[in-house]
Every structure is written in C-alpha cells, then in structure tokens.
Amino acid sequence: MARPKLKERQIEVFRTVMATGSLTAAAQQLGVSQPSLSMTIRRFEDELSTTLFERIGGRLVPTDEAKLIFVEVDRVYGQFDRLSDAIHAIARGDNSVFRFGTTPSIGMRLLPKALSKLRGDAPSRVFYCDFLPQKDIRDYLLFGQGSCVTSIAPAEDPNLDCTVFAKGGLYCVMPKGHRLAGEKIISPSDLEGEVLISFNPNTTHGRYIDATYARANVERETHVYVHFVEAALSFVAENIGVAILDPYSVLDCERSGLVARPLKDSVDVPAYLYWSKFRPRSKATDELAAALVDMARQNGIETA
C-alpha cells in the first residue's frame, strides 16, 4: 500500500517547531493559531505512525525520530535555499556569464573603467571581452557570439539596433614637452609642419579627421599611417609626431607622458552600443550601457 505523500505545509510546521522549540513561538512565526499548529503536528505524526514530540516537565521535547527527521529536513531546506539564491542571482545577472565585444577606441580606456564598476556591483559575474575589427561586428552579434558591441564606427545594418551613449570631438595628442602642449585648443592649421601620425581616409578615424579638416579648409598631410589607436599613441610617446584621436582613446594619456588638446571645430564622434534585433537585450547589456554613460560623464565626455 502506497505511503501518503507528505505535505509541504506539514514539513514547514515541523521545521519551525523544531527550530523554535515551542508551539507558541512557532505559531507566532507562522502567523497561525496554536490549536491549528497542534492539529497539523498530530496529523503529521499520524501519517508517519510515530511520535515526534512529548511533553516533559511542561516543555516540548522532540523524540529521537524527530531529531533524525529534522536533520534531513534541514539539509533539504538548505539545498532549496541555495537553489533560491542561485535563481535570484541569475535573474539579477550576478552569477551569469556576460560576453561582449568592442573595437579598440572605446575598449582601451573607457570600457575598462565601466567594467571596473560592473565588477564592483557583481563580483561573481564572469566577463568575456572580445576586441573586434569593425567588419566583424555584424556577424559577432547575429551569430550570438556576444550580447553587445561598443564602437565609434557607424554600422548601418537593418539587423542591428544601437544607441549612442556618448559623443565628443577629436583631440590632438602630443608629448608633454611639445610646443603646442600649453594651448587650450588646437586647430588643424596649427599642425602644419608637424609629423602627423594618422589613418587612411577610408577608415572610421580617417573619415572623422578629414571631415574636421574640411571644416577648417585645411588639407590633411599624413606622414605615418597606422591602423590602430594603440600604435598611434605608442608612436607619439616615442616623439615621432602627433596624432588626432577620438575622445575615448585619449583618456588618461598623461600616464604615458602625453597631453591631449581638443581639436577646434571638430565633428562629433559618437560612441555606439550595438545589439542584435533578433535577440533579447540582456540586463547585463543595460548595466554596461549605464556604466559607460556614468564613466563618460565622470571623465568630462558629453553623454546622450
């Protein structure tokens, strides 16, 4: 004959009585009357065909069987509590794996600051940060390799959604002892005769730089071509010349003995956050966006 299935309420009442050592205290904790609690315990004993509590000297004393049952009940409840904590942590994103991509301009300086903030808010979360060329952004998101991508490159793709979280003008980066280092703002014409470390016109940086030079009615003359902002900063640090970079790449450049001055009449360089239209935007992506806005604002960059 099948044993009757124990009810969750019976186990909860039993556990509370064992924990409090008193029917009165257990009834108060559970928000029920003491007679109702006593009846639940009696039915529990009847179903188990064993005595769980005895009155000795006016005190409620658990039997040996009750003590053994309580060990098992407490073990299972402990597992359930851990399960509950894990579920809530996943819902908050605390224990999730967050994989995202970035192109170097935002990834070098601004993104590490945002990631440091996210790590402080969710220390148990695992992060994967992939550095990507611009041409890989679309496939990275559409094939689900990561949740989002940050970039200064416009990606006009109907399969992607994006938001602009910051924007700012171009900067001229030079060694600390450069003749223009004391200026508050520099125009493209001021750089005539300087060795310019810069980018091809068909690159993202090249387009922003050429648009700014066109505003100033100055023709750009590049002496050293680079593909990445890291190379430009390294060459400037070696006193090879000066470079024009986006506002995100030049953050904290003084640590390398460099100074960055705003370029007069510069076009705006937006900072984009991209994600796939065909996948839900994760909570972690929203948190990254908020951290990027916060860090941009703290570093004097205009935010959207």
Image: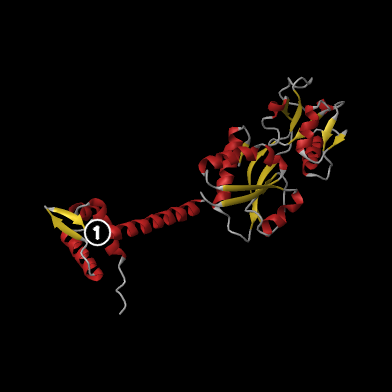
* Colour style of the rendered protein structure: secondary structure
| Left or right: where 242 falls relative to 49 | right
Answer few, some or many: residues within 10 Å of disc 1's Cα (few below 14, many 20 plus, some between 14 and 19).
few
Check disc 1 and report its element: helix, strand or loop.
Answer: helix
Of all residues, the one furthest to the bottom in this rendering is 1
**Residue hosting label 1:** 64
Seen at 26% across and 61% down, the residue is 65
Above or below, 89 relative to 220: below
Question: Considering the image in quadrants, where does the N terminus appear?
Answer: bottom left
User: Which percent across, then down, holds residue 199?
Assistant: 82, 39
Q: Quadrant of residue 290?
A: top right
User: Which percent across, then down, holds residue 61?
Assistant: 19, 55
| Left or right: where 267 falls relative to 285 | right
User: Which percent across, then down, holds residue 23?
Assistant: 19, 55
Q: Choose between 164 and 144: the one closer to the eye.
A: 144
Above or below, 227 relative to 143: above
Q: Choose between 10 and 231: the one closer to the eye.
A: 10
Seen at 72% across and 37% down, the residue is 246
User: Which percent across, then down, holds residue 4?
Assistant: 29, 74
Of all residues, the one furthest to the front in this rendering is 64
Above or below, 284 relative to 218: below
Q: Choose between 229 and 120: the one closer to the eye.
A: 120
| Left or right: where 46 falls relative to 297 | left
Kindly tell me whether residue 71 is visible in this rendering.
yes
How many numbered callouts? Answer: 1
Seen at 21% across and 70% down, the residue is 46
| Left or right: where 232 falls relative to 68 | right
Kindly tell me whether residue 263 is visible in this rendering.
no
The amino acid type of the residue labelled 1 equals Asp
Q: Quadrant of residue 233?
A: top right
